Image (cartoon, rainbow, N blue to C red):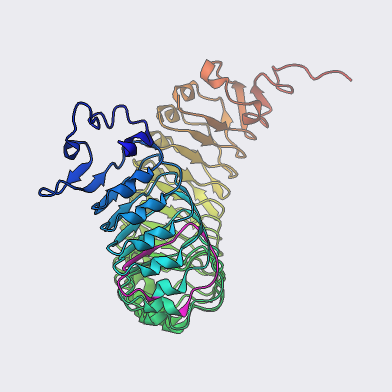
Amino acid sequence: MAIKASFSNVANMLLDWDDVHNNDFCSWRGVFCDNVSLNVVSLNLSNLNLGGEISSALGDLRNLQSIDLQGNKLGGQIPDEIGNCASLAYVDFSTNSLFGDIPFSISKLKQLEFLNLKNNQLTGPIPATLTQIPNLKTLDLARNQLTGDIPRLLYWNEVLQYLGLRGNMLTGTLSPDMCQLTGLWYFDVRGNNLTGTIPDNIGNCTSFEILDVSYNQITGVIPYNIGFLQVATLSLQGNRLTGRIPEVVGLMQALAVLDLSDNELTGPIPPILGNLSSTGKLYLHGNKLTGQIPPELGNMSRLSYLQLNGSNWPIPSNICSCAALNQFNVHGNFLSGSIPLEFRNLGSLTYLNLSSNSFKGKIPAELGHIINLDTLDLSGNNFSGSIPLTLGDLEHLLILNLSRNHLNGTLPAEFGNLRSIQIIDVSFNFLAGVIPTELGQLQNINSLILNNNKIHGKIPDQLTNCFSLANLNISFNNLSGIIPPMKNFSRFAPASFFGNPFLCGNWIGSICGPSLPKS
């Protein structure tokens, strides 16, 4: 009952914890006892929205083998008395609000195999004494506020299989001793303040399946022998790595995810990466890579996410051989040429972002055949000609951005068929004609951006039927007439309509608005 007394918000969750009316504690919620000795061996109070603290009376449960308090709102510190539970093999206090240091007494738990303290507010260093737990297989301390170095002795635990340290404030370097973790498959130090270089002997970490050292301050080159790893995920993004991508990376046949983005890598993209037949996600963007996009990438039959940068080259049509491609993002490069017509073969594509490049020519009507697209961003290029009517066939489209090109012609009435659309931006083009009345059918549209074109005529009253419309910009066109007086249209600021000399609205300078004050 002392354990219950330390909790709050227990009224509806621990009703049967009542030694007056029911002294059979083995029948209480979350309490499990040994059938013979009737000692409490397991306590599971996870995800009950409990507040308060963890009672020091926990240490009285000397036969406790498992305790799970994850997903509550517990505060305070982890009691030192936990070290008295000598039989504990499983401890999960994750996703609470625990603070303070990790108690050294945990190192007394010689039977402990699983320790999960992630998603709390724990501070201080990682106790070096954790290395004294001989059977520890899982250690997850992610997303706390831990500081200091990773204890080197931790790397000599041959039993440890899972090490999760992401999202702390750890410093120091990656020790060459990390490859002494011969049983480890998961190594994650993402989002800390680690410095130094990737150890030259990294290829000796042959048991690793997940290696994530992203978003630190690691410098230097990617070691050549990294190609000896058998990892499924290699995440080095968000550091300050320099030099070229080692060609040996193309021999890592187990790779499912390769993320080298947001570094300072130079040189060309190695064509040998096309040999990565198991890779589903390839992220190389945010570097200083040069040269063309290798056509060999089209050999990556399982590729579903591709985000990269290159130089002043067109997109090779071979990329369209990646039938599983789900996301293609080459935003913010110097890519040129036209959109390959073969893009129509990418039936799995949901996200296509070619923005902020130097693409030119017409937008292919074939893009309207990629029926699963939810995002199409071609903004900031040199596309010309008219908008293909077939884009109106993209019934799953949520975002359409064609702004800042050289498009002419009219706004297609077929856009009224885009029943899922939330954002349409065709600003800063040379579009003429009128605003189609069919746009009034778009019940989910949130933003309609048509400014800086040559659109004329009246604002159709049908737009007032777009009740989700929160952002409207039709400024700097040749619109005329009266702004629809309906109440839901009055919420748009005058700036949404400026630059239309013959448009009548309630703002200073409008042909029917308030007079300019006399000096």
Per the image, is 161 magenta?
yes
- Residue 309 in sight in this render: yes
Q: Is residue 110 left or right of residue 383?
A: left
State the residue in front, 301 or 151.
151
Q: Determine the image quadrant of residue 43.
A: top left
Dominant SS of magenta comes to loop
Q: Which quadrant of the rendered structure holds the C terminus?
A: top right
State the residue in front, 246 or 42.
42
> Residue shown at 60%/39% (left/top)?
453
- Residue 318 in sight in this render: no
Task: Answer above or below: position of 68 versus 136.
Answer: above
> Residue shown at 59%/25% (left/top)?
492
Q: Is residue 101 left or right of residue 373?
A: right
Q: Position of residue 17 (x, y in %)?
A: 25, 32
Q: Position of residue 145 (x, y in %)?
A: 51, 54
Q: Position of residue 400 (x, y in %)?
A: 46, 44
Per the image, is 208 magenta?
no
Q: Which quadrant of the rendered structure holds the N terminus?
A: top left
> Residue shown at 23%/53% (left/top)?
63
Task: Answer above or below: position of 444 versus 43.
Answer: above
Q: Is residue 270 left or right of residue 287?
A: left
Q: Determine the image quadrant of residue 480.
A: top right
> Residue shown at 22%/37% (left/top)?
29
Residue furthest to the left in view is 36
* Magenta-highlighted residues: 156-176
State the residue in front, 232 or 487.
232
State the residue in front, 35 or 490.
35
